Image (spheres, rainbow, N blue to C red):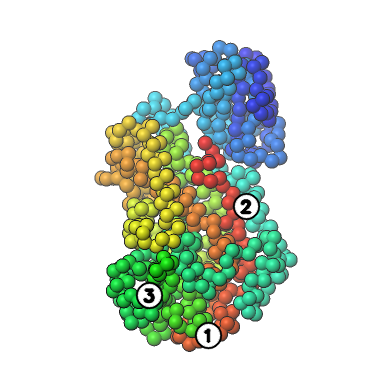
Amino acid sequence: MSRGKRRYNEMNESSVTPDEDFTVCVEIADRPKTACKAIMNVQLTGDGVVSEEDEFVVSEFPKHVKRGQKYYFPINESKIKNVTGVKVRGDMMVGKAGWNIDKFTVTNNKTGQQNVIPVFTNIKSERTYTFLVDDVSLPQMDSRRAERQNDLEEMRDLYELIEEKLPGGPPLVKTLPSEEEFSFSYKLEIVGKLKELELDAKVRELFSGGFKEMADIEKVYHWVFDVFPEPSNLNRWRDDVLFGMQRLMGVNSNVISLCTKIPEKLNVNGEMLQPFLENLSLPEALKRKRIFIIDYEILQNLPTKAGYVMSAPIALFFQRNDGKIVPIAIQLFQKSGVANPVFFPSDPENTWILAKMWFNVADANYHQSVTHLGLTHLKMEGVVASTHRQIHKCHPVYKLLMPHFIYLLAINSSGLPLLLDQGGYGDKLLTLGSDGMKALIVRKHKKWRLDVEGTLPADLKRRGVDNQKLLPHYYYRDDALDLYKAVRLYVRKYLDLYYASDNEVRDDYELQNWRKELTAPVSKQGLDMKGVFGENGKFSSKEQVCLTLTSIIFTCSAQHAAANFRQYEEYAYPPNLPLSLRGGPPKSKCALEEDDLVQSVPEKTTTYDTMVITNVLSTRAMNKLGDFEVK
């Protein structure tokens, strides 16, 4: 075959012609950051014969390139009948950062046969890469063990884990690898949206000063309705039923538990609660499983922003005859006392409302620090890194997990400073501020277990809410269970394709090394993750692997979606779910005026910043579960 330089051509399937032996489709992952005038050498392999090198040059990518965009070029090689793979080498102009390619598709123009060759690699200069058709194998069955080991050693250097970014918390990647960076279009959409909202001086000017009355807060959506739409319901802060529904279908729906006994630290008795139990006695209500509890003891004695107070509340909820739950008692701090009364729905209206708002401050700070950032982002970052470090890209488990990890490290790399640095959004908006958020993340990290909090059925059972006859309006539980079961079935069937028996699991040294790193102490480059399925420090069955992978995939997908995508809906109207309140919580049952509520809610500038960050965080820029950006 003659050697020659060719350019990528953007073509469709109708452009494939039988005039050439093969048409190669390159599916790119991103727009190169450097000059595009570089040469990539490509060889087809197959039938024991390789072609001569066919050089082709990319002069310039289009201005708007998205992940998955395809480029085609022809190759003549009549000797090859069955393609087994490709060899790729970039010249010096490709650079050390490399060009990120998702896959090649090679079409035999005579027979119509297509071979998909997965890549998902940065093709860097001065190295030849070999990619095979259906390049999936367990390590103990692969003849290229040395090559796999060399690749993993490179990944361990690239994905080095350190504790210094969040001492005492989940280990994080030292430096973001270039392979993990945002795609060009995704970064433009998210970062551009944030900058646009932050720099809109005219809009920010409208949010100067404080509110004069509660009704003024609603007016902000009329000023900027095209950017900040009005949330669907502005009455959660007033309505007890809507306040109860926040526990079952809000952004923090995985904390409520069945109450089997009133804790001694909560200063209530049957006589106090009787008016709210629909003619049941307290023992009857407990026996019939009609009382539920949320206890934020974990929030005690955390650092806060100067001048702000962090409550550590205990709240009881009652399931009414119509199946809906309502709050029936709120104690804002753990230790009862004269200055820490229990508030009831029968208290003066604004006093009860303010008690609920202070409970929601605790709920919001826990949600942002633990449910969202701490678990679905930071905890999972270590899992992503360990997967790269210990499981080769040709391993079936690697290919199963990677579509669920897309952009997670990039989001963390940009989001961690944005939310946790001094002066960042978390520091400005949350009562805990930066130091308190970090301390809370560390506290939860030390207690969290993959086989309990990280596994949906076990977590529901731990909280006593796994029976679907309880809490008929617990939509988070019911929807999440269906998704969890679907993911678990998907993972089980996938594993059955590659593991004929449990023996092959036990012999899979890459998978075993991965589990070892997940559970190893941080001092030994491990994640110190508790509750990873297995026994005697190893995976001994496919079912243990299936449970582990299911929990990880569910956390990175469905659980993250539940914690993240309704943020604007919940937080954009501060009385519904305030990230902070001014002043201090009520210390008596004295009647309050509306002005007392106005003086407690955040000022306009804080409201604006809350709307900005929750608007951006709620952006749905990724595909739905199962419709992967990369396949």
* CB contact under 8 Å: marks 2 and 1: no
Task: Check the picture and name the quadrant holding the N terminus.
Answer: top right
Q: Along the polypeptide, which appears first: circle 3 or circle 2? A: 2
Give percent across and percent down for residue 91: 61, 29
Q: Are marks 1 and 3 in contact (CB under 8 Å)?
A: no
Label 1, label 3: how many angstroms apart (C-alpha)?
Answer: 28 Å
Which circle, 1 or 3, is nearer the viewer?
3
Q: Secondary structure at mark 1?
A: loop
- Give the number of callouts: 3
Is residue 57 visible to the viewer in this orientation of the structure? no
Q: Position of residue 107 (x, y in %)?
A: 58, 22
The residue under label 1 is 592
Closest to the observer: 327 or 199?
327
Query: Residue at the location (35% across, 30% down)?
Result: 140
Question: The disc labelled 1 sits on which kind of residue?
Answer: Leu
Which one is nearer the viewer's eye here, 467 or 463?
467
Q: Mark 2 sits on what residue? A: 190
